[in-house]
Amino acid sequence: GGIPSANGLPDQSKGNQWWRFLLPLIFHMGIIHLLIVMMIQLYIGIKIERTAGWLRVGLIYIISGIGGNLLSAIFVPYEVQFGASGALFGLLAVIIVELIQSWQVVDRAWWELVKIAVVTVVMFGLGTLPYVDNVAHIGGFVNGILAALIFIPYITFGKFDAWRKRILLIISIPILIVLFLIQFLVFYLVQNSEFCDGCKFFDCIPYRDGLCENDFTNPDPDVA
């Protein structure tokens, strides 16, 4: 895949820099951005790591982060990516999966689900503001759900529940693999973000005129 050159068009001679899908997970826009990400990681990640272990959490974190960055590269290829927001949304998805998988033993499960749902909706809502990569959030969340079904350990409540969770695990593996393959094929072979014109509103909603017009998403430097 090409990267933007000085004239705003893809420079194929410098393409195929696959590490760009991974680097945003460790790059941040400043100390405040880094501190916010670290606080969210500690608040969410520690809870998950206590039950799942660091290896499982690390795999989910990386899968969600790369999946979010990959989806963002497809739909908003000229938007600069910083931070591990896609990976953080993957961890948020893990909390939801854990809650549903352990529903029978969770105290006031419906209330916990409402709280998580409100947080999720608010975070996705904030992602529709400019200079926030909400596409990466969506990609990280979807990949986080699939990765959680694969890697997070679960308890079973009877034969039906055991079969249900095993089937979810089994079908999640090929779905996750196929999802990554499709995204890589679209990015490297199609390289066209205009096949879904309405999808831009997942990333930024123009609550007022000109709100979503910024230099990051505009490939033509001569257009303000």
Image (cartoon, rainbow, N blue to C red):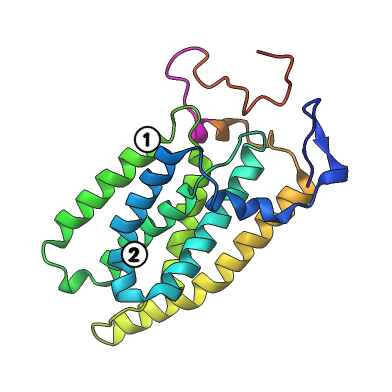
Q: Position of residue 206 (x, y in %)?
A: 47, 20
Label 2 residue SS: helix
Q: Position of residue 136 (x, y in %)?
A: 52, 45
The image quarter containing residue 90 is bottom left
- What residue is rendered at 77% in x and 27% in y? 8
Residue receiving disc 1: 125
Looking at the rendering, in which quadrant would you find the C terminus? top right
Q: Amino acid at mark 2?
A: Val
Chain part drawn in magenta: 201-209
Can you name the residue that lies furthest to the right here?
Answer: 13
Can you name the residue that lies furthest to the front here?
Answer: 31
**Viewer-side residue, 215 vs 68:** 215
- What residue is rendered at 50% in x and 69% in y? 59
- The question of residue 206 being in magenta is answered with yes
Residue 97 tag number = 2
Q: Amino acid at mark 1?
A: Gly
**Viewer-side residue, 178 vs 125:** 125
Can you name the residue that lies furthest to the bottom here?
Answer: 159
Q: Is residue 51 above or below residue 99?
A: below
**Viewer-side residue, 43 vs 199:** 43
The image quarter containing residue 122 is top left
**Viewer-side residue, 99 vs 51:** 51
Q: Main secondary structure of the magenta part?
A: loop
